Image (cartoon, rainbow, N blue to C red):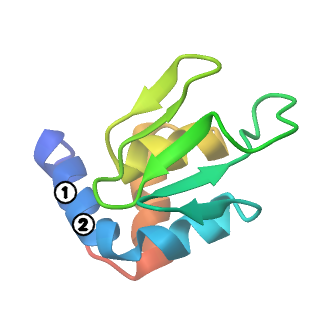
Amino acid sequence: MRIDRDYFARVHEQALPFLPAILHRVLPHGKTIGPEYVALNPHRADAALGSFKINLRTGKWADFAVSASGGDVTSLVAYVLGLSQVEAAKAVLRMIGGTP
């Protein structure tokens, strides 16, 4: 299996329909507000919802309090769980029962 940019795009495409379930698993104390999932950032002493947001349509995410951001489900899981991109992609595929 060759891991390249297309690999991550395929993982993202498979994972996007499952994004709400993935978010509830890796960021269980978040809340859906309109088209976004708003959660506490597990990498800082985040006391209130508001700055860490994930777009439920695109998978783009950002924590505006610390300038952390990404454009897909894999980068979010990597950030939240402290994994490499490859490890995160494999974790996402396991969560959704997807294929590489």
| Location of the C terminus (image quadrant) | bottom left
Q: Residue at x 16, y 40 (%)?
A: 4
Left or right of 44: which side holds 83? left
- Label 1 neighbourhood size at 10 Å, few (<14), some (14-19), many (20+)? few
Q: Secondary structure at mark 2?
A: loop
Q: Secondary structure at mark 1?
A: loop
- Label 2 neighbourhood size at 10 Å, few (<14), some (14-19), many (20+)? some
Where residue 51 appears, x then y in whole percent? 63, 33
Q: Residue at x 64, y 38 (%)?
A: 82
As measured in the structure, the alpha-carbon distance from the residue carrying label 1 to the one carrying label 2 is 8 Å
Disc ID at residue 51: none
Query: Relative to the observer, which residue lies in front, 38 or 60?
Result: 38
Query: Relative to the observer, which residue lies in front, 5 or 45?
Result: 45
Q: Name the residue tied to disc 1.
A: 1
Splitting the image into 4 quarters, where does residue 33 fall? bottom right
Q: Residue furthest bottom?
A: 97
Contact, mark 1 vs mark 2 (Cβ under 8 Å): yes
Where residue 74 appears, x then y in whole percent? 40, 49
Q: Name the residue tied to disc 2.
A: 100
Q: Residue at x 39, y 54 (%)?
A: 89
Where residue 92 appears, x then y in whole percent? 44, 64
- How many marks do you count on the picture? 2
Amino acid bearing label 1: Met
Where residue 32 appears, x then y in whole percent? 57, 65
Q: Is residue 64 above or below residue 15?
A: above
